[in-house]
Amino acid sequence: MEIKLSHKICLDPNYKQEQYFKQACGIARFTWNWALEEWNRQYKSGFKPKAFELKKSFNAIKKIEFPWMYDVTKYASQQPFIHLQTAFNRFFQASSRYPQFKKKGHHDSFYIGNDHIKLDGKRIKLPKLGWVKMREALRFSGKVISATVSRVANKWFVSLNVKLYQAPNSCDSQAGVGVDLGIKTLATLSNEETFEAPKPLKCFLKKLKRMQRSLSRRVKCSHNRHKLRFKIASLHAKITNVRQDSLHKLTSYLTDQFGGIVIEDLNVKGMLSNRKLSRAIADLGFYEFRRQLEYKSQLKGNYLLIADRWFPSSKTCSNCGQKKEKLKLSERIYYCSACGHEQDRDLNAAINLKNLLYQSG
Ligand SMILES: [Zn+2]
């Protein structure tokens, strides 16, 4: 079985390296836009365009018309053609919209193939550039397939695409666990352990709210407004990092300790329509939680059971099995009128989830 993952790592380029990044992004964007324009033009005049043919004609004029492209990795001016073809394939299969032109400041990224990348702990070597510092080492052990350097606000990142080697540390625990994801508490386990949402997250979110309020008061197109938008974007990136980190800790713990894991198939769409909840749910990254849990349990051999979305984990009494018709979100303690059982709402739900392990065999 083959598992591919990507790990996005913050970079610390020096001045020269940053200039290179900007240049390579510019070239990748230019090439994409050139190719798309050419595609549109050919299509309008009755041809059926193909990206590799566009690439051929591009390369034929490159040396004379775009000699400055040779200052950076060749991938910056080659990969966009492959990406364009993929984008059109997706469009033809109706799985995404018509490819769009790229804009500076919105689409700042370029791709590098694995034959031009070297990794060594917390640094990465890129063509014509030397070693660039990374904030952390690659999280997975596997073969690096490609890298994409991109800019988010004023920060640079490299996203490494990795084909994983089979993990040697498979989980041989027989223990089972049910996990209830929450708003206030990140996760409640059926063995009464709880994982809190990381503290800096709350503080960042408060700050974000404040900034967004003041953004709406600023004059449009003003310098100050622009500066603030930049700050908001980098705060968003920080929040994502903190959240990713806490989710990785949680999912690694679960897959290391428990051979059987049950989670809910959250009806995220339905929940997102509830505006109050939606913010918190998006922040906790339920999708991301499930994604991590899925690949980690594949790697370590855990049995992962995803409960049906209609399974009444919160409404059922974990002691006697009695089911309530209604349970308000404000009722933090589950009280069973049939057997008198009283328990924290989330813990009750987690235990019900764990019990599914034994019902399904
Ligand atoms: Zn009961």
Image: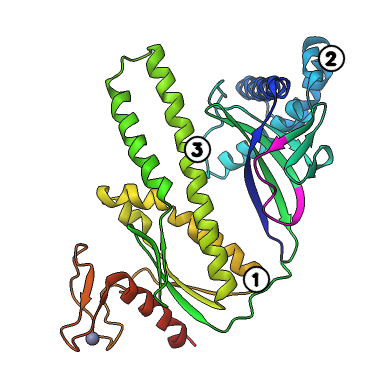
The quadrant where ligand 1 appears is: bottom left
Tag 3: amino acid = Ala
Whichever of labels 1 and 3 marks the residue nearer the N terminus, that label is 3
Residue 319 % position (x, y):
29, 87
In the image, the residue with mark 3 has its CB under 8 Å from the nearest atom of ligand 1:
no
Tag 2: amino acid = Lys
As drawn, 295 above or below 357:
above
Magenta run includes residue 159:
no
Per the image, the residue denoted by label 2 is 63
Badge 1 element: helix
Residue 349 % position (x, y):
33, 74
Q: Magenta stretch: give its range.
A: 133-144
Whichever of labels 3 and 2 marks the residue nearer the N terminus, that label is 2
In the image, 210 versus 318, the foreground residue is 210
* Identity of the residue furthest to the left in this view: 337
Measure the C-alpha gap from mark 2 to mark 1. Answer: 50 Å
As drawn, 297 above or below 76:
below
Q: Which quarter of the picture shows residue 228?
A: top left
Mark closer to the observer (3, 2): 3
Whichever of labels 2 and 1 marks the residue nearer the N terminus, that label is 2
Residue 271 % position (x, y):
31, 56
Per the image, the residue denoted by label 3 is 237
Per the image, the residue denoted by label 1 is 300
Q: Is residue 244 something one can see in this rendering?
A: yes
Badge 3 element: helix
Residue drawn at 69 percent across, 55 percent down: 140
Q: Residues within 10 Å of mark 1 (few under 14, many from 20)?
A: some
Tag 1: amino acid = Lys
Residue drawn at 41 percent across, 53 percent down: 284
Measure the C-alpha gap from mark 3 to mark 2. Answer: 38 Å
